[in-house]
Image (tube, helix red, strand yellow):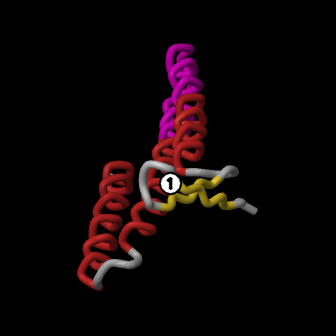
């Protein structure tokens, strides 16, 4: 479980909270590392002439990981906003998903 520390700066009266376990920066970094690994494996397999369906699947998984992480972070931003923001979020997410699925089917 993430622990929160409250620190107070001597030069300002604002209070900021830091998360020591899984902050946004750490999640972003490890997501990029995982996606880089998947894309690198897909690149090597493609260069070796392995079936293109395997390469496409690895690239699809990497893309899905990034979309999931970004959509979770976007929801955290949109959740306290008015209803129209939530509708815009859902519409954008559906268009992104359609943009990934439709080219695979067609």
- Secondary structure mostly seen in magenta is helix
Residue beneath label 1, please? 69
Look at the picture and state if 46 lies above or below 10: above
Q: Residue furthest top?
A: 48
- Farthest residue toward the front? 10
Circle 1 packing at 10 Å, graded few (<14), some (14-19), many (20+), is: few
In the picture as drawn, the residue positioned furthest to the right comes out as 1
User: Residue drawn 42% across and 68% down?
Assistant: 75
Q: Secondary structure at mark 1?
A: helix
| The quarter of the displayed image where residue 70 is located | bottom left
Q: Position of residue 29 (x, y in %)?
A: 55, 37
Q: Residue at x 40, y 62 (%)?
A: 74
Is the residue 39 above or below the residue 21 in the image? Answer: above
Q: Which residue is found at the position 53% from the left and 50% from the top? A: 24
Number of callouts:
1
Q: Is residue 100 magenta?
A: no
Q: Nearer the viewer, residue 91 or 21?
A: 21
Report the magenta residues as a range. Answer: 38-59
Q: Position of residue 21 (x, y in %)?
A: 69, 51
Rendered residue at 25%/73% (across/down):
88
x and y percentages locating residue 45 in the rendered image: 57, 21
Q: Pick the residue in front: 66 or 53.
A: 66
């Amino acid at each position: 479980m993430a622990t929160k520390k409250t620190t107070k700066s001597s030069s300002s009266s604002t209070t900021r909270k830091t998360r020591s376990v899984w902050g946004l920066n750490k999640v972003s970094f490890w997501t990029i590392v995982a996606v880089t690994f998947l894309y690198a494996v897909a690149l090597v397999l493609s260069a070796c002439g392995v079936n293109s369906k395997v390469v496409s699947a690895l690239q699809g998984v990497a893309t899905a990981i990034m979309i999931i992480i970004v959509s979770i972070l976007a929801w955290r931003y949109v959740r306290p906003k008015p209803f129209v923001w939530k509708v815009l979020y859902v519409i954008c997410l559906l268009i992104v998903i359609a943009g990934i699925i439709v080219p695979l089917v067609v």
